[in-house]
Image (cartoon, helix red, strand yellow):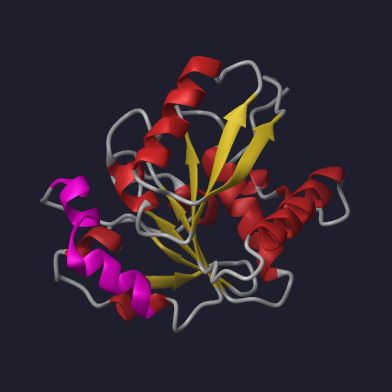
């Protein structure tokens, strides 16, 4: 079976009547329920390891939330191995890193996508350590400013156990959704990742079990 291209993985947008799209609508509902009474505008989509379906989950969730008539912003905070730009066939040469280091204004690097109500901030370039950038006042200030323009902000990051980036971000957002892949995620590593989030006092909204099988 041919491998899906990144764009073709946006099932919730390409086939809104599919069972997969229905699953993401259920995920959207569960997040709404979990965040009842809370200001849940910034959400980190995380995973313990790479290749668990974290980014694909994020993009499909963005489509589903946008279909609820909300303005959604996707931020690619995986500056080490950025990939969200591949889903939308846009450049990642300018983006988050450039804003945090003061070379660009956020309005100049926020890109529209082919999805209605979904915009993107790609990873961009950086000279400092990503963990230093996410620990900075500039990152907190940026998230605060963006909440004035968007209903929901979904953030992608490196795997929790690969470096400290996701842990730092988890402490600065309203909630975290963790993606676990069947047959790949070892229970001990998932528990370790969850422990790291708890140490940062992150608000874990829930876990998504990715049932995707290898083709």
**Viewer-closest of 88 and 82:** 82
Q: Is residue 187 left or right of residue 1?
A: left
Residue 113 in the image, given as x and y percentages of width and height? 54, 67
Residue 132 drawn in magenta:
yes
Which image quadrant for residue 158? Answer: top left
Residue 55 in the image, given as x and y percentages of width and height? 52, 44
Residue 154 in the image, given as x and y percentages of width and height? 50, 59
Q: Is residue 44 left or right of residue 77?
A: right
Residue at horizontal 24 percent and vertical 78 percent from the top:
105
Locate the N terminus by quadrant.
top right
Task: Identify whether 214 is placed above or below 46.
Answer: above
Which image quadrant for residue 178? Answer: top right
Residue 24 in the image, given as x and y percentages of width and height? 74, 51
Residue at the left extreme of this rendering: 127
* SS majority, magenta: helix
Task: Identify whether 152 is placed above or below 12.
Answer: below
Residue 5 drawn in magenta:
no
Task: Identify whether 215 is placed above or below 126.
Answer: above
Residue at horizontal 20 percent and vertical 68 percent from the top:
138
- How many numbered discs? 0
Which image quadrant for residue 97? Answer: bottom left
- What range is drawn magenta here? 129-145
**Viewer-closest of 194 and 212:** 194
Q: Is residue 127 left or right of residue 1?
A: left
Locate the C terminus by quadrant.
top right
Q: Would residue 123 be visible to someone looking at this image?
A: yes
**Viewer-closest of 180 and 120:** 180
Residue at horizontal 72 percent and vertical 60 percent from the top:
33
Q: Would residue 186 be visible to someone looking at this image?
A: no
Residue at horizontal 65 percent and vertical 39 percent from the top:
208
């Amino acid at each position: 079976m041919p491998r899906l291209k990144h764009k073709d993985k946006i099932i919730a947008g390409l086939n809104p009547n599919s069972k997969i799209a229905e699953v993401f609508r259920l995920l959207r509902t569960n997040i709404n329920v979990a965040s009842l009474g809370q200001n849940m505008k910034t959400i980190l989509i995380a995973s313990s390891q790479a290749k668990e379906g974290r980014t694909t989950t994020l993009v499909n969730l963005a489509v589903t939330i946008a279909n609820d008539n909300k303005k959604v912003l996707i931020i690619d905070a995986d500056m080490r191995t950025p990939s969200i730009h591949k889903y939308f066939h846009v450049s990642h040469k300018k983006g988050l890193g450039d804003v945090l280091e003061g070379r660009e204004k956020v309005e100049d690097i926020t890109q529209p996508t082919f999805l209605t109500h979904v915009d993107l901030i790609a990873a961009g370039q950086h000279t400092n350590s990503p963990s230093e950038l996410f620990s900075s006042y500039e990152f907190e200030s940026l998230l605060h400013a963006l909440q004035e323009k968007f209903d929901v902000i979904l953030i992608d990051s490196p795997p929790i156990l690969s470096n400290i980036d996701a842990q730092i971000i988890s402490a600065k957002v309203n909630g975290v959704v963790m993606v676990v892949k069947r047959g790949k995620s070892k229970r001990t590593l998932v528990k370790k990742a969850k422990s790291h989030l708890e140490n940062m006092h992150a608000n874990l909204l829930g876990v998504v079990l990715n049932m995707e099988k290898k083709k």
